[in-house]
Image: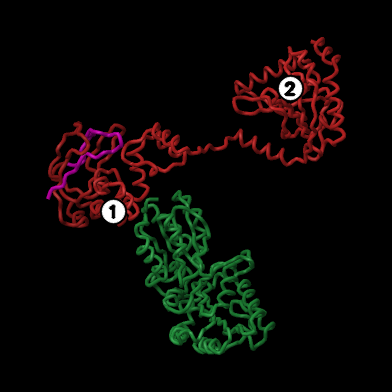
Amino acid sequence: MAYEILMPQLSDSMDEGKLISWRVKPKDVVRIGDVIAEVESDKAIMEVQCFKNGEIEALHIKEGESAPVGTVIASIKLSNISGTELNEKADEPAKEKTIQEKELNIHAQRQAQALDRSMASPKAKVLAMSHGLNIRSLQKVQRLPSPSHEKDIVYYLEKRFFTPRSLNLIKKYKLDIFDFELSKKYDSKDVDEYVNKSKLSTFKPIGSFQKALMKNLEKSFQKPVFHIYDHIDSSYFQLYKDYSISAWLIKVFSMAMMEFEGFRSSIKDDGILLYSNASISFAMLGGRKLYMPVIKDANMLSIKEIKHALKNIQEDINQGSLKSSQMQDSTFGISNLGTTGIEGFDALINQDDSAIAAIGTQIDKKISVNLTIDHRLIDGYEAALFMQRLKALCLDEEFFKRNIEDV
Amino acid sequence: MLYREALNLALDEELKQDKNLVLLGEDIGAFGGTFRVTEGLFAKYGKNRVIDTPIAELSIVGNAIGMAIAGLRPVVELMTANFSLLAFDQIINHMSKIPYMSAGKIRLPMVIRMPQGVSRQLGAQHSESYEQMLSAVPGVFVFAVADPTYAYHALRQSIRMDDPVIFIEHELLYNKNSEVDVNAKVNPFKARLVKEGDDITIISYLKMLDDTLTCIDEIEKSLNCSCEVIDLCSLNPIDFQSLEVSISKTGRVVLVEEGHKMGSFGAQVISWAAEELFYLLDAPPLRLSGENVPIAYNRQLELASIPTPQSITKDIIQWGKQSGL
């Protein structure tokens, strides 16, 4: 009885193989697991093993020749004698094989028997059957291992019906390949379409930047805070609009901070750190991300310098070159959502700041200012006086004129 | 709380609440029990309720059956499972059958406690496991106790049952220490999910459960998978429902037991899995059991005849590699 050895498919994209070298010649006795040839696929040179015991009858292609996958490359005359007898018959040194090698041989035999019986776990068989796969024929062309398990069948189905890109998408959206009818090959466009059609929510892991931000926010939320709500007059902001409201706010707040040291303090370790100057963290956007860069010693800066500082920081943010050192050592924060038309809101205190001002939009020459204040550093009376001072500064034309003149 | 202290607490509380409850066994009174489970109870409840018996297992169980028929609630301590063989006629021909043969007119509210298994060099006649034989007797519940919390609750509930219970402990577990939640809701018939996992269901009970747990890290690392570990707890009846939930998820089942492989209790579980869950299995079931030899006295041979953490780790990893993991 002759057994035909076919050109195996050694990779997914392999259509034909080049026979590099034969390791056997006709009349040679071969055993299960013996390497009989080396074949070059489109990727690499790989060894071809023999799955039967017997004698080589004929080699059908020559070294250096190519043949399509599935072509007969050699035939074996099968022997009925068992593997061990064959061992003894084949060559003398075989007798000296260690017990371990014999065990390996038995293992190879079992593998071969498994191949004959298309060995697979019950679960794998059920799965293969439900997708019309013939495990035996796939094992013959080495598309499935023997024994096959559930994951081998899944792997085969993945490779057969999905492009690598579409598989990545399936992983990303936490889909199951069995969500798809396995009758055609799917690419990433099909998976996108499926996602859109079934209105799936997407999952995105939290990045390290976002994680740090979330941690800070949670810390802020735990602070014992209270709020003060009031309005400031915006007439002079309008009048001197060579400078943005943001720049003026930083100026005005920094001046008020110099008069109330609670707003220049910060809790550090076991003590309270009091800064001699007013440094303000200011909420700015970069793409969709929120940053709180710090305008340091804002009380020492002219309105023009503040304008420049804001511009430089925005450039740094846009280029992604904002350093962490540029986001430290503030004691007060400002978040201005005025440009969005929002009337008023509350903000969470930034990092170790003592308070934050949430700025709304201008309505009837008034701007809402809501302070969120860390009660451990500032009491209600001091906060009220601070707000009073702020309102007074905004109504003080001399203050605005002086600042313009300074420039 | 120690395993033996949890058992002691359960007995103490039940003795306090039920005047009909009596304990009987060898050296359980003045001496406090071979494994100190009944320590202090003799002084507290007296010789009429904590009864020292002669060394005669057949008579101990026979007396207990009589007490139960007459309306008491006896809890028997047999020094080890090895000696329960002497009482097998009473256990099998009387205890398990009287309620049935009386058409339920006679109930037997009694518990037989006994430790079993390989300890440290106690020799062949003191190292056996007999859960397989005891579970094969219709008419008795069999519980195997691997954990102090389960020990406390399962013993209290066993005592309150109106049917006979065989309560199997393990000689090496008496000094096992862990938190005991006296308020936990424990159903003694339900298997205990000790660790969740996705790829292998490992079922065990008594001492082998602890040995298996020490291997999990290495197995998971080596096979790059996660193991689910289940303490079977009730050996008869078996909580097949919980096992099915787990095996349906993992597709792979391993059973670790100390008894000899031939005719073992675990074979029953594996047979059920093959019969009922065949098409869900993604690997041949694996049963790790003791060797088919009387347990030797020599420590090396003693360890060689039962699964140990080393052999459990090695065998499961090897099996896993051949089974598609």
In the image, residue A222 sits, relative to residue B45, either above or below, namely above
- Which residue: 64% across, 28% down? A290
Q: Magenta segment: does it hold B199? A: no
- Which residue: 14% across, 38% down? A60
The percent coordinates of residue B209 (x first, y second) are 50, 64
In the image, residue A120 sits, relative to residue A377, either above or below, namely below
Instruction: State which chain disc 2 sits on.
Output: A
| Amino acid type assigned to the residue bearing label 1 in the image | Met
Q: Residue A229 lies in what quarter of the image?
A: top right
> Which chain is green in the rendering?
B
The percent coordinates of residue B30 (x first, y second) are 65, 84
In the image, residue A194 sits, relative to residue B277, either above or below, namely above
Residue wearing tag 1: A119
Q: Quadrant of the N terminus of chain B?
A: bottom right
The percent coordinates of residue A405 (x first, y second) are 82, 9
The disc placed on residue A362 is 2
